[in-house]
Amino acid sequence: MSEIRQIYAGDLIASPHAHGGGSVGLTMRRVMFALTPATLFGLWLYGWPAINLFLITIASCLLFELLSQRLMGQRPTLGDGSALLTGWLLALTMPPWAPWWTGVVGGFIAIVVGKQVFGGLGQNLFNPAMVARVALLVSFPVVMTQWVAPQPLTAAASPSFVEGMRITLTSPAVPDAIASASLLGHAKTEMSRGIDLVHAFAAPTAPATSSVGMRTGSLGEGAALLLLAGGLYLLFAGVIGWQTPLAVLAGIALPAAIAHSVDPAHYLGVADHLLSGAAILGAFYIATDYVTSPNTAIGQLLFGLGVGLFTWIIRTWGGYPEGMAFAVLLMNALTPVIDRYVKPRILGRRRDGRELEPVQS
Amino acid sequence: MGFMERFIGKVGSHWGVHPSDHKRPAADAPVRKMPMPARLYVPLLQHIGAAARPIVLVGQKVAKGQAIAEPQGMVSATIHAPTSGTVSAIGEIVAPHPSGLPMLAITIDADGEDRWIAPDAPGALPSCADPFALDPMEIGKRVAKAGVVGMGGAAFPSAVKLTGSLRAKISTLIVNGGECEPYLSCDDRLMRDRAADIVDGIRIALHATGAKEALVGIEDNKPEAIAAMQKAAAGIPAVTVRPVPARYPMGSEKQLILVLTGREVPAMGRPSDIGILVHNVGTLVAIRAAIRFGQPLISRLVTLNGGAMRAPGNLEVPIGALADAVIAFANGLKEEPARLLMGGPMMGMQLPDARVPIVKGTSGILALTAAEAAERQPEPCIRCGSCVKACPVGLLPLEMSRRIASADYDGAVDFGLKDCVACGCCAYICPARIPLVQYFNHAKGELSARERTKLRAEATKKLVVARAERIEREAREKAEAAARRKAERDAAKKAAAEAAAANPQPTTEEAES
């Protein structure tokens, strides 16, 4: 058995000597798999300009990740898929026909400002995609609220590949015929003009509110039901817990239900809230971001409720029609506080950390 | 694992992990008995506590079952000769420990006769036809004499637990047949083959401790063992066999108690704090052998398993046989193992060398292939919280490791480092493959080193203070003595002067001048 001796002259490793087989890359790939149906639907719905923007945003994120790691002298870790996923999520929250440079600037903010300056994967305080989305919205409010009505790739009105390139690269003024408002945006504009919701949605300029996806909005907005299906897959695959998504949706739905039943002319209903904006995307894919959310079950419930509630408050009374990104960032900032005060109970101890008393039966 | 179970797991409490158990085909192969090797290396420390003290001399002839080392201190265990032969050395060998540090052992050259100690010889253990007529304290004493220790891996001296139970007023005996470590099947095999002996051992332990009932917890991935034990326990109302879900670490004392009784042991306490005593099935068979037949613990069942092992299975092995001899008897290795382990893959230790002896707590020798060991470079923590969900104790392994990485050991203690049982669930499930247990072991080592340094510094400080005090005292005493002498001199001078004044006579000096 002398050969064993030789082998064991090398490294000795602490237990366990087995592994469950999971990896960071696998987790990221599962999230991407869950996003795929909704993304394909969104790309079909908005045609070539959306496809261009989607690819540019992801490519920028990968490029800035590579560049940052090069500059810091680190081993590149593009293979873990985290930068790709950040770009993907960011693209889903952008206006589908936004010009090329929004994707590049967004990618820079997300990866460099939102993630790498904090120390890279796992170190960032705020969700990188949401940091980029909010920074773009605040810096370029016109571009970032330029919505178009759905132009499915298969429809005659859909821009061709060449036209799509022209739209992405030169961002010409969107013709009035296809310019549209998102549901939340329309509600906010009309309300600010003193028109109540009942009349606002009766008007011919009101955006389509089909629940099956033909909605005006960001790239991922129309496919709320497909996003929900992907989210349920993540739940059952064990990638995410039920606490965060349920709490986010409850945080939006409960105040919406109460306010809408009291005053339907001034408050949107539950279905409008949950299917519009980034409610489903936020609940299942953004608020569940491991790095920037609490890691105990109770902490996640608190976090999710906060995200939902802030979203509803910003949508209802804030200056912006959509509030998910702001709400997520606000709660990201509170995550260290939640993690500090909400800890699991240790076996054989009380919640306050004191030992249980010995009991004789 | 089904989708529904996963979902239910998410809603309810969800400690532990579900590793694939790799128990078969090793568990289904019949037990083979290893022939006596020519030379045995019997370590003096095979248990928790103090090492035993040798009571034989080099060159002395010993009989099988003869005590060769006796316990030292409150927690220790007797060591016996596993076969008859001659003591050829008492010295250092490589310890069955990752450090590969030397440890003391008695080397016995077998004479091939395998001759038991004569029943009337001094030091021979008495046999007993009716253990239930014995005084419970006497059972504890005989178990101590037989050198029985916990066979589940921790190797705590069993007699200490038995006699302690009488004082602690134990109501329930929990019999641990969980065997939650993957690959291991020696307890499974024991329950299938010797269920009646285990139940007899349970009844003896109930008598010895005064416990009223015994609950036998067996993971439900061992249906044959459950059936055998249920059959053996039928008609004995005090003994109940209870299948428990297969989930690692179900065989950990506190987890098994929680699942079987719904009760929690205080964090820093012992099961006896809540009226419970836990014994492994193997230990109960050893207790029975000691009481009924006067046989000390000199052999045990060892699982040989792992992808690199040619013939996985369970072997009855004498204590002190070298691991490489055991592997060789079991047809050797198929390929070079990526890791050679003693114990299970979750908590077992990597062996520095295969020339280490089997000890009382050795449940298995595993030769894992590279694919099984699944070694890979760690990635950054993404705070996914898998470790938080898996931790059976309710700790936050990710927060602890983050603090340990920056040498903030007190911070890690605040997150419950001292409650960590090193079960390995967190590192097993971690998608980033962070060696969390390594972090915790390191921190525990640093903390105990710091504790030792602190004690030493305190002792040094005491010495320094004492020295300073002594020097000061001596100086003071010297000064006082000098002052006293001076006062005496002055007084004498004064007295002389007074006397001179009273009686004016020329002084010597004046006379000389």
Image: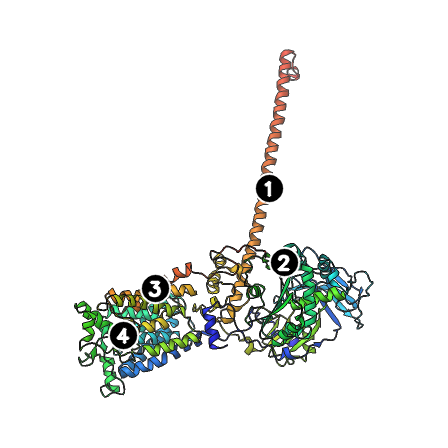
Q: Which mark is residue B467?
A: 1
The answer for how far apart the CA atoms under marks 3 and 1 are is: 64 Å
Q: Which mark is residue A102?
A: 4
Whichever of callouts 4 and 3 sits on the residue coming sooner in the sequence is: 4
Q: Which mark is residue B170?
A: 2
Amino acid type, label 3: Gly
Q: Position of residue B391 (x, y in %)?
A: 50, 66
Query: Which residue is at a point 52% across and 55% down the rendered structure image?
Result: A355
Mark 3 vs mark 1: same chain? no
The answer for how far apart the CA atoms under marks 4 and 2 are is: 71 Å
Element under label 2? loop
> Label 3 marks which chain's residue?
A
- The residue labelled by disc 3 is A306
Amino acid type, label 1: Arg
Mark 2 vs mark 1: same chain? yes
> Label 1 marks which chain's residue?
B
Whichever of callouts 2 and 1 sits on the residue coming sooner in the sequence is: 2
Horizontal side of A311 relative to B131 (left or right) equals left
The answer for how far apart the CA atoms under marks 4 and 3 are is: 29 Å
The answer for how far apart the CA atoms under marks 1 and 4 are is: 76 Å
